[in-house]
Structure formats: structure tokens, C-alpha cells
Image: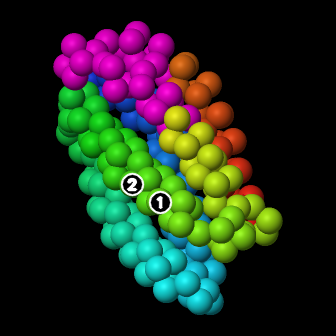
Amino acid sequence: MSLPPANSDPRVYQIRLTTQNLYSLLFNSFQTISNLASTYNQIATASTNKVLKDDIAWLKESIDKDIEKLNALQKHLQFLNAQETITTPGELLKVFNEITDFAQLILLDDLITTLEGIGSVITEDELMIDGVGLKDVVILLKKFSISLKLAVDPLKKLKDEEVSVIQLEKSEVIITERVEDLKKRVTELENIIN
């Protein structure tokens, strides 16, 4: 026998519905980014360039720690999204903002900045993955970051408890359209590694 849903607030249901695909795509994409860092780490380990080895090893370690933090946020989110959990639209939007801010500011912006720094001191062929150079990977990561920002903006602009179901439904339509572009960006990153 399962427990009845704890939330009768239709806004809670709508936020969960709106964010479901976005969260799934977001968390899966960071596994791809972790794989990218691992691939770069393997390439750098074979290099004679000590600075490159050290920078990439630090990058890999940093990404792994950040993804651990993201996974902890994901566990909190899973608890909040459980049907039995009593929560509010404000709490769901707060966690949404925490997760997306962390993903954008800590993971993506730091990753892009670090890779650009590494790219400025190496030759293009030193970190090549199946013919794709570091500069091209940075461009793809920037496109992914922009797509993520565009996808999450409709919900980030909503004000906690004042939000209506109609506003959430409008946001869902926009987010659904933008998630398609985000999927495309994730696929481009996956194609580099696979």
C-alpha cells in the first residue's frame, strides 16, 4: 500500500512536471562532462608537458568534487520530489535555483575558464579527441552553458509563493522548447567522447 500524495497544491505538481525532463538532462550531461575530463586526463597523462598534466589532473579532481556536490543536491531533490514529501512551490523553486546556479557558475563557468586557460598555453593538437581540438570543445561547452541558461530562465524569474499554475504552465511550454536545444548540445558533447 502506498501513501497518498502529500501535496494538494497544484503548483507543486506543476513545478515537478516542468522540471522533470530538465533535471534528468542536466544530471546526465554532467556525467558526460566528467567523462570528457577523464578523457583529457588520459591524454594529458601520456604527455611530456608537466604543466598540462598538472592542470588537467587538477581539473579532473575539481570536476569530480563538484559532481559529488551536484549529486548531493540531486538526492535532496529526489526527497523533495517524492509524492509523500510535503513541500511548497517556494522550496522547489529555491532548490531549482541552487542546482541550476551551481551547474552554471561552479561547474560550467569554471570548467570553461580553466579549459580556455589551458588552451592558451598548449598547441591545438596536444588535447585532441578524435580530431576535435580543445578550442572546439570550449565552444561546445559555451553553447551548452548558454542553452542551459535559456532553458532555466523562465522558472528562475518566478517569485516563490506568488507563482500561479498558469505562469508555471507558460514556463513549461518555453522550457520544453528550449530543452530540445539543450539536448542537441549534450549530444554534441557526447559525440566527442563516444
Q: Residue at x 56, y 62 (%)?
A: 119
Query: Which secondary structure class fits the magenta region best?
Result: helix
60 in relation to 5, above or below: below
Q: Which mark is residue 87?
A: none
Residue, disc 1:
117
Q: Which mark is residue 110?
A: 2
Q: Nearer the viewer, mark 1 or mark 2?
A: 1
* Number of marks in picture: 2
- Disc 2, SS: helix
133 in relation to 84, above or below: below
Left or right: 121, with 167 as reference point = right
| Residue closer to the observer: 150 or 17 | 150
Magenta part of the protein: which range?
Answer: 147-172
Q: Residue at x 40, y 10 (%)?
A: 166
Asked which quadrant contains residue 134, the reply is bottom right
Type of residue at label 2? Asp
| Residue closer to the observer: 153 or 80 | 153
Asked which quadrant contains residue 123, the reply is bottom right
Q: Residue at x 46, y 45 (%)?
A: 23
Asked which quadrant contains residue 12, the reply is top left
Q: Residue at x 21, y 28 (%)?
A: 90
Category of crowding for the residue at label 1, using alpha-carbon neighbours closer than 10 angstroms: few (below 14), some (14–19), many (at least 20): few
Q: Position of residue 11 (x, y in %)?
A: 32, 22
Q: Position of residue 79 (x, y in %)?
A: 28, 52
Magenta residue check for 160: yes
Q: Position of residue 140 (x, y in %)?
A: 63, 47
Magenta residue check for 188: no
Quarter holding the C terminus? bottom right
| Residue closer to the observer: 92 or 139 | 139
Left or right: 18, with 185 as reference point = left
Q: Are marks 1 and 2 in contact (CB under 8 Å)?
A: no
